[in-house]
Image (cartoon, rainbow, N blue to C red):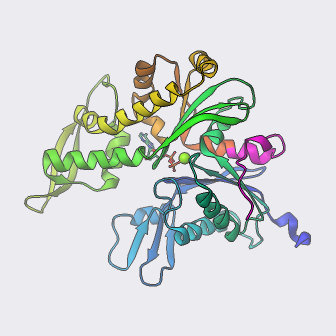
Amino acid sequence: MALFGFLSADIAIDLGTANTLIYIKGKGIILNEPSIVAFDETTKKIIAVGHEAKQMHEKTHKGIKTIRPMGDGVIADFEIAEGMLRAFIKKVHSSIFPSSRVVICVPSGITEVEKRAVRDSAEHAGAKEVYLLAEPMAAAIGVGLDVSSPVGNMIIDIGGGTTEIAVISLSGIANGASIRVAGDELNIAIVEYFRKNYNILIGERTAEEIKCQVGSVMPLKEEVIIEVKGRDLVSGLPKMTEVSSIEIREALSDPVNQMIRAIKVALENTQPELASDILDRGIMLSGGGALIKGLDERIRLETNLPVHVAEDPLTAVVRGAGRVLEDLQKYSKVLIRSKKY
Ligand code: ADP
Ligand code: MG
């Protein structure tokens, strides 16, 4: 094996609920695809992963099923998740030789059992050494915060399944919270809004498009009207309706308020010295959810703190994991220590 060692590669993985990104040591990000799998329901054989599987999502027929195996932020379907990870690794790694070292990001609230599941998955997928890194820590490193200094930094990573809130100092998470209200809940809230107020059933993909295009949490400079297509719940027929960005904002208000509440609770639980650092330095937002229009402004208004949105928030976690991979020694303290089995 040692003879072929040069063929193996060290990689960092952000196995998100919505998107999986892979970074190869010395090369950078070489994969960025939705965490979706399409498989044959009878044989359980994986038919497609990533972009290809997303095309099929919600448009399948009996026999083919698509799922997002990372569910709420941790592995919901172990076998399928492992298959997906293996398929993604194969895409970036044409050789069959196993990767040596893998840094893999996990939600900060993960249990020992879940840590083990992630570790096992990565090992089955070919990793020789597995290092776990908390997502908010990865995001903080990815946006260039100095995580090792004795200064408090607050980072909020809003993904598909979870919102991770963390105060980081001295290479560790001083306090934090992980709530299962994030991008997916916003989509669900939009679906519900149409069902209740318009008697129209729309798909989650449509809801996501609406959220990304016109979703907001503060009044827009110019409110817009969009056309939305779905199925009329009374007649059963396809139907189109017009809706304003003001209504979409109303639809999003519940889950957004839950996020705001969680942020306030996390601030209340922050030690005074760290809190005073956050007062100076502000809050950093990352993850796809950071892109909702007006979220930074809303958090600023609610907390009276400076709020910044990370540059390219969707890649912050994998960029941080990549930095850790490039210098495992320097970053050894930030890795999650877990029991050896
Ligand atoms: P995860 O880490 O859980 O895979 P990501 O950080 O990749 O999640 O973010 C995915 C989430 O971000 C999805 O819920 C997606 O709808 C949302 N998202 C992506 N772009 C935007 C946007 N422009 N506006 C609002 N939400 C967005
Ligand atoms: Mg993420």
Q: Residue furthest left?
A: 235
Q: Residue at x 44, y 34 (%)?
A: 262
Look at the picture and state if 84 lies above or below 229: below
Q: Camera-side residue: 209 or 289?
A: 289
Q: Residue at x 52, y 39 (%)?
A: 177
Residue segment shown in magenta: 321-341
Indicate the position of residue 104 as horizontal and vertical percent values: 66, 54
Q: Camera-side residue: 303 or 190?
A: 303
Q: Residue at x 32, y 75 (%)?
A: 61
Indicate the position of residue 204 as horizontal and vertical percent values: 32, 54
Indicate the position of residue 149 as horizontal and vertical percent values: 75, 26
Q: Is residue 164 visible?
A: no
Check if residue 330 falls in the magenta segment: yes
Q: Is residue 41 visible?
A: yes
Quadrant of image for the C terminus: bottom right
Q: Is residue 15 left or right of residue 172?
A: left
Check if residue 95 falls in the magenta segment: no
Indicate the position of residue 86 as horizontal and vertical percent values: 63, 68
